[in-house]
Amino acid sequence: MKMRKTIRIQKLLFAMGMIAGFSGCTGGDRESSGSGAEVILMTLDPGHFHAALVQKSMYEQVDPTVYVYAPEGQDVKIHLDRINGFNSRESDPTSWNEVVYTGEDFLEKMIAERKGNVMMVSGNNARKTEYIKKAVDAGIHVLADKPMAIDSDDFHLLEEAFRAAEEKGILLYDVMTERFEITTILQRELAHIPGVFGSLKTGSPEEPSITKESVHHFFKYVSGNPLVRPAWFFDTQQQGEGIVDVTTHLVDLIMWEAFPNEVIGRGDVELASARRWTTDLTPVMFSKVTGMDTWPSYLEKDVEDGMLKVYSNGEIIYKIKGIYAKASVIWNYQAPEGTGDTHYSIMRGTQCDLVIRQGKEEGHKPKLYIESREGARPESFDTDLQRAIDTDIAESYPGVELVKLDENTWTVNIPDKYKIGHEAHFEEVTKNFLQYFGEGRLPEWEVPNMITKYYITTEALKLARE
């Protein structure tokens, strides 16, 4: 099956090691190191920690010198501190050489100098789509953190960027880390084994065939340190509302899991409903997560009764190729002790449901369950399920085991070597991008599906605001 071949290729990429280059972080002003690498990175306005996570590892294909263009301020300083932390860590240190330009004309300077051939952008989303379009127009490839568009105007500009990228033979690719989470991968694979899953149910708005819910937290730890978020992160005019931000991942996964390698167009999608609501922060909460004593003036518009109200939560219910789906994101201030961000997902099949839970019973770690229904499954279901694990799954992921919990429920024991964690997923996405860069093209379904993904999120925002 074509889908399983794709996953096996992904697994091979997962296992590949990338060779490190030199050591130390000199910060000297020079062109490339002369390493002969195909890719020279330029990091633009790195206001989000995801920009640094792309550089948590070295890559043979990427020059160790990275050119950073940013406005002066705390955002770029924090970014460089993270890179220096990777360079100075005891275990497997990186050897990035960051050459930094700061100034209000940072975008124009990057375009004029063209010291690299790939722009990495992850930060304030207010101008991100503009950055992407101008980079593509200048013949620069783009690796962009989500979201690439936070409203309808951005979406139309993004469409123009994709058209320009096609004309120029430029790669424009967004960072979809959640495709590399192991329970999600196994949920996807099992959903395409008819003897186990059957086929996707049509579902309804009340009980969608596919549901994905993501719970995030403003205060969290990254690489062992408390995450300091910039104040603009809480301004939805700069960061984007939750319904167009984290839901990007969820909408992407719904397409990626349910319709692997298929082109999804706008005509395949029908919005049913959308809603949005706020997370309320006290001044103390805001200060703890930003390090600021007071909120800046641009946030005053969102303050009511002394509370900062952030439209960080959203829900979209829609039909995709006739199947009902729901994507929802929730932001809380801080996770309970010993927990973190969580993910819930269910795919409802005619023979069983495939469910990912990450609650207290699972030790707050994602766990995949297979839940069958009597009367809906064939007599051979148990045997077919075991065979699927022992052959289809074990071929790509040796060591994965099936455990029966009761007459109708199984779970999957997954070796720790596959549980690489969210931060490591950025390396896997970057490896994919480098593979596509070497081939000179993206898979044929990636670009139309990216366009449809941002169409869904930005149209849902319009609907939720009505």
Image (cartoon, grey):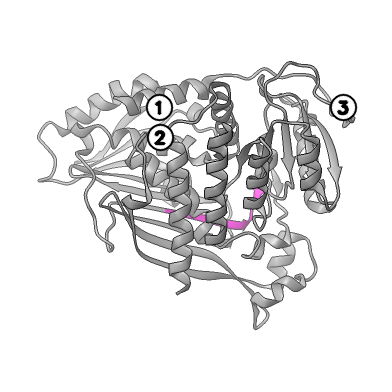
Question: Which mark is in front, 3 or 2?
Answer: 3
Q: Quadrant of residue 293?
A: bottom right
- Depth check: 144 or 226 in front? 144
Left or right of 20 in this view: 2: left
Per the image, the residue denoted by label 1 is 7
Q: Is residue 191 magenta?
A: no
The circle on residue 185 is: 2
Q: Secondary structure at mark 1?
A: helix
Which secondary structure class fits the magenta region best?
Answer: strand
Question: Which mark is in front, 3 or 1?
Answer: 3
Q: Is residue 218 magenta?
A: yes
Q: Which comes before the other along the chain, label 3 or label 2?
A: 3
Do residues under tags 2 and 1 come within 8 Å of each other at their CB atoms? yes
Residue type beneath disc 3: Arg
User: From which residue to which does the magenta span run?
Assistant: 213-222
Figure quadrant of the C terminus: bottom left
Residue type beneath disc 2: Ile
Residue type beneath disc 1: Ile
The x, y position of residue 333, in whole percent, is 60, 63
The x, y position of residue 362, in whole percent, is 43, 45
Give the Cα separation between the discs numbered 3 and 1: 40 Å
Number of numbered tags placed on the structure image: 3
